[in-house]
Image (cartoon, rainbow, N blue to C red):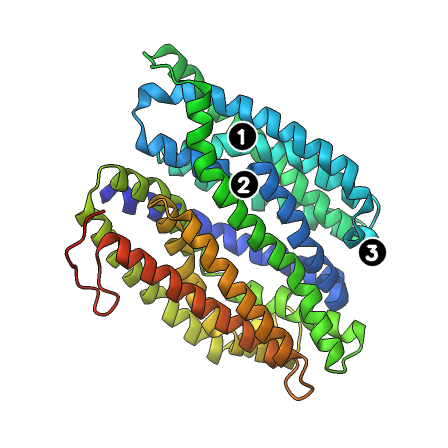
Amino acid sequence: MNTFFKGTLLLVIAAFIGECVEFLINLVLAKELGGHGMGLYMTILPSIFLLIILASLELPVSISKFVAEKEEKYHYSMLKHAMVLTLVFSAIVLSLAMVTLPYIPVFDDYHPLVRWIVIVLIPIISFTSIARGYFMGIQSMGRIAFANFLRKAVQLILLVFVFQLLEFKIQTSILIALCTLVASDLIVFGYLGYEYIIQYNKLKRKPASYLSGRAVRQNLLAVSLPTTGMRIFHAISHAVQPFLIKAALLKAGLPAAIATEHFGLMSGVALTIGFFPAFIAHSLLIVLIPTVSESYAKRDINKLQTLLQQVMKLTFLYGVPVCIVFYYFAEPLTHIFFESTAATAYLQMLWPYFLFHFFLIPMQAYLIGLGLVKDAFIHNVWSTVISFLIMFVLGSIQTLQMEGIIIGMNMGAVLLALLHYVTICRKVGISALGMKTVKHVL
């Protein structure tokens, strides 16, 4: 447990600093792009993140799980085969992107170079994934924490420097913002790549056991494919969500420009503020995947039960107070970005969405560690379908509009959290009511 909490604490501290930087990044973007420009920026991001997920093949998750479960003597052979797998997959994704991206209409409202920025990201993300997965697996959280901070710090420095130096039109400003994103990922690629090569050469000099390429691919893809499928579905749903929201608002009678602006206020302001404390949940996720995987491989039921209880208590202890702060201090928080009463109301209404997501993130790591990725995927499908249906129906009502959208978002988060929690409790032998241990065999 000591290793778990030390790793978590390190990541939380680094992530807190990183989130402060991220907050400043969004503040700079909000001031530079304005409400409409922020809406356009937030609309394109989910589509870009979808391609990033495809490029990574969720190798950080599968490699970290493999490394945590296997002895060190197998790591060198696994990494060799993982490199070949990444090279082949990256080439395939890159080829498909170059052929299809020019014809995807989502990019039509943006600068023509945005498509090529996305293409440049693919190999960077693909090969950085191997290093991330390995360092997560050996629980070298210092490197992961520094890489996460470095990425955001570089992006902020570049944004401030460029926007202070020159003024641009909206399309060019969005392009510049995306270029800083690529540049920061490139710096992280250089840092993690350098550290990875050092560790790889150390493994090369140690006694090693050979693993067949087929065995490694089966082990990695058994985790990567369903996890990627879940992330793709999640990314697609987030890419569709802006258009669903705008369609509902248009049906409710709002003009297109106003609908885009309100989506920008919710996504760029309310969600940015609300997900600020999620750095704690993401830190837990990074540490939980290898920890739960190792405990599950050893069938250590007591550790799994105790760890779940501690994670739920920790999430409750920080999640509830921050949601209270968001509700009662929504006005001064949102006015840091824009003086908008709408943004204030959205932040107050979204507190259930934030609170249940703080629980969802570590629970997703638990499901991955327990080998229940398919269950997590099914849960995501059901909750998203129901959430989108409620969002569109209620958002189309003239008297509700954005309030109806937010009700649907809250309902989806609550449903998904309950499905994840009940499934984990059944697997590790904990009663959903009262958190009492019950007899169970993994």
Answer with the quarter of the image where residue 362 lies: bottom left
Closer to us: mark 2 or mark 3? 3
Image point (63%, 81%), residue name: 341
Q: In the displayed structure, does residue 424 sit left or right of residue 123?
A: left
Q: In the displayed structure, does residue 336 sit left or right of residue 348?
A: right
Q: In the displayed structure, does residue 315 sit left or right of residue 134?
A: left
Which residue is label 1 attached to? Answer: 191
Q: Amino acid at mark 1?
A: Tyr
Marks 1/2 in contact by CB < 8 Å: the verdict is yes
Name above or below for residue 266 compared with residue 202. Answer: below
**In the image, farthest residue toward the left:** 439
Image point (53%, 44%), residue name: 228
Answer with the quarter of the image where residue 38 lies: bottom right
Could you say whether the residue bearing mark 3 is in a helix, strand or loop?
helix
Could you say whether the residue bearing mark 1 is in a helix, strand or loop?
helix
Image point (38%, 48%), residue name: 372
Please say whether residue 234 is visible from this viewpoint: yes
Image point (47%, 53%), residue name: 377
Name above or below for residue 198 compared with residue 281. Answer: above
Instruction: Name the disc covering residue 109, or none.
Output: 3
Q: Amino acid at mark 2?
A: Leu
Q: Quadrant of the N terminus?
A: top left
Which residue is label 2 attached to? Answer: 150
Q: Amino acid at mark 3?
A: Asp
Callout 3 environment at 10 Å: few (<14), some (14 to 19), or many (20+)?
A: few
